[in-house]
Image (cartoon, coloured by chain):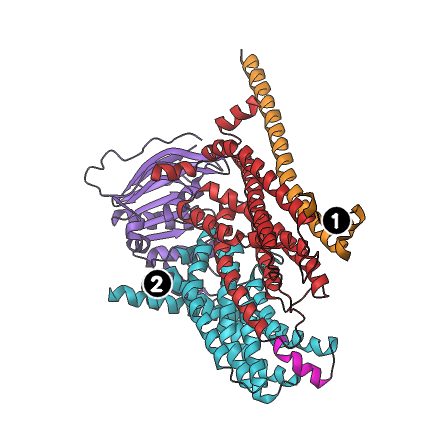
Amino acid sequence: MLDAIQFSTWAEFIDMGGYGFNVWSVYALFAILVAVNLILPWRKKQKIVRQLKRRMTLETEIQSEDSSNGD
Amino acid sequence: MTEKQTTTSAAFFATLKRDLLIAFKKKNDIVNPFMFFIIVVSLFPIGISPESDRLTEIAAGVIWISVLLASMLSMDNLYRSDYEDGSLEQLLLSPHPLFFLVLAKNISHWLVSGLPVVLVSPLLAYMLALPSEAYGTLVLSLLLGTPIMSLLGSIAVALTVGLGSRGLILAVITLPMSVPILIFGTLAVQSTLNSQSPIGYISLMLVMLSVSVSLAPLASAAALKISVN
Amino acid sequence: MWVWFSKLGSPKWFYELSGKWLPWLIAAMVIFMTIGLVWGLVFLPPDYQQGFTSRILIVHVAVAGTSLAFFPLMLVAGTVTLVWRMKLADMVAKHAAILGAWFSFITLATGSLWGSVMWGTWWEWTDSRLVSMLFQLFLLLGVISLRSALEDSETAAKACALLSIVGCINVVIIKYSVEWWNTLHQVASPVSLDPTSPNGPQFWIATLIMIVAVYLFLSVSLILSTRNEILERERRSQWVQDLVLKN
Amino acid sequence: MSSAAPTTSPNSDTDKIMLAARELFCARDERVLFKNLNFDLPQGQVLQVQGSNGSGKTTLMRILCGLNDSYEGSIKWYGQEIEDQAASFFSSLLYIGHRVGVSKVLTPVENLRWSCSLKQAVSDEQIMDALKEVGLRGFEESPCYTLSAGQQQRVSLARLIISPASLWVLDEPFTTLDTKGVAMLEKIMQRQAQAGGAVMVTTHHSLSIAELTILSLG
């Protein structure tokens, strides 16, 4: 298994046979694609849930005020 | 059956006549795309080079792109005023197939804004030093290409007719769609310049035109119904 | 059949079902992506022609291949929206357009990073794949801007559905016409190397794994966004409120 | 918000029901405009739709015309689905909305020539007579941008006189009309009802028409 590793030093790994910039940029872009499109929806969901909760507590407060005023 | 048929054609011609009448009364709809086309084409030699050799090389592309821009900009008013004054609702409530009424509007729009541009194109081709043997192909390709542009643009205009301020959205939607026409139109001219027969490209454009004539008005009609909803 | 179909259209049903599937999809995505990336970066032997740049291709080919799926997806979603008026289809279509634009952009960027090594140029008009991907990106941006311009959500849904259908037909025509255009302009083409030219079996297996990983990622991201859209659009319904209270 | 009760006239035993709406429901952007809305429109009746601003009057009118399809429920035309007989429905329908469908660039005659020929053949004499009846004599050949809003409204009303359509759907046709114009329109509507046609109209006026029934929305 370890024989199959194509690099013997870290520097070689970073260098990628002289094309380090291009190879790593591509992997970075891919990482951005994946991260952004998973993290954004995930954070948005939290935001939506938070807003919904706030609105619902507001509504129940208004309702309870209304009913106490009505009595 | 025959009775309905005649009224559909009557409605078709009534719509065609009405739109032509409006265009001739407004005049701007005819003059502006035409002027725009001439001005844009005249800017290229100033921006690139006055040498006729270089101009010859770009002539077909410049004319074609300017035609695309002119036809796109002139599209904006295709359904706009009808939408604002309520005529569009009347059009949608007609018992006749909307396909033909939309087609009538597209034809009238092309006659008014597309055809004049095509007719003046040899003059501009001369100014851009395009060899005269290519004039015929240029005009023919434009004659086939501009109606396709009108028909495709009509879909985008119909989709955006309800928008208050449209800005450049029409361009963003329509221009990418015009790529195939641009390719075949300019290739036809180029092949004439290389003394090859442009017949292949011309017949391909003919196919594209007939497909657009039979499908695009359907999409435009559906788009109008969506926008007026 | 109809019961199933109308169930499929129900946002609540989709929300519950996708909630069950999501952990599995995410797990599969992580596994495939880890295998693909580690293989690609560490184990893949250099290609005899392209050296280590073949590592770029594992990612590029996977993303490019997947981004071809967006217009067909939007074609289906658009048809369903227009014919059966299924709201769920529109929610998927909305986020498919955005994700599709992302994919197209990354395809172009990774493609030019590869091209800059192999062709010696960042942008090459003689490569028909890049050109037609560029126009696919433009068409997707058109759909996105149309949606953001239209205020009424129902009008926006139908209008974007129609534009997606027209756009899908157009993408196909553009693709073939650009290819043709290229074959006629090969006077001084530096594009002698094809991005799909490496032919070691290792390369293709790694690419295949990445393609599966990217498709899984696409589904996960699309499902997450669609679920958000469901919560937003159905925020007044009882089941959403119950769900929020449980959280 | 509230539902309206069916308001069929009590003596509708032999009248043919032209338009029947059942269980109409319409929500716009999550706001319910109306639900459980039922009504019949028999021949020979003028149905006035009333309701406060934003109660969905215009939406209802557009739904009935088929301009708006975001609703649930059924609308039947002589007992059949409208889609099954679209051509006959649309040739019997005449709709005048807020936007009256009059192009400002054209003259009244040119406008009517087009808008009437969308439904049926029309002669210039008919158009001239109709324009005379709506009080636009002398304005036949002036472009519509020189006319006042009320006069433009009258141009569109001339279509009512020319058209043989049996169902009129008029959305706020009185707003820009003067007293004379209101009386004229009431007369035309009454004539339509007496001839066996039907009218649906939204307005806040109290109409003096014998064949009137009222449908209240919210």
Residue at the image point whose x is 45% and y is 57% from the top: B88
Q: Position of residue D165 (x, y in %)?
A: 30, 54
How crowded pointer 2 is (Cα within 10 Å; few <14, some 14-19, many 20+) is rated as some
Q: For residue B108, say whether it is visible.
A: yes
Q: Position of residue B52 (x, y in %)?
A: 70, 85
Residue at the image point whose x is 69% and y is 57% from the top: C53
* Closer to the camera in the image, C128 or B48: C128
Shade of chain A as shown in the rendered figure: orange
Residue for badge 1:
A7
Q: Position of residue D187 (x, y in %)?
A: 34, 49
| The quarter of the displayed image where residue C56 is located | bottom right
Q: Which residue type carries mark 2? A: Asp
- The answer for which chain carries disc 1 is A
Residue for badge 2:
D129
Which-is-in-front pick, marks 2 and 1? 1
| The quarter of the displayed image where residue A62 is located | top right
Shade of chain B as shown in the rendered figure: cyan
Q: Are marks 2 and 1 in contact (CB under 8 Å)?
A: no
Q: Which chain is purple?
A: D
| The quarter of the displayed image where residue D206 is located | top left
- The answer for which chain carries disc 2 is D
* Name of the residue lying farthest toward the right: A11
> Quick check: B125 left or right of D139?
right
Shade of chain C as shown in the rendered figure: red
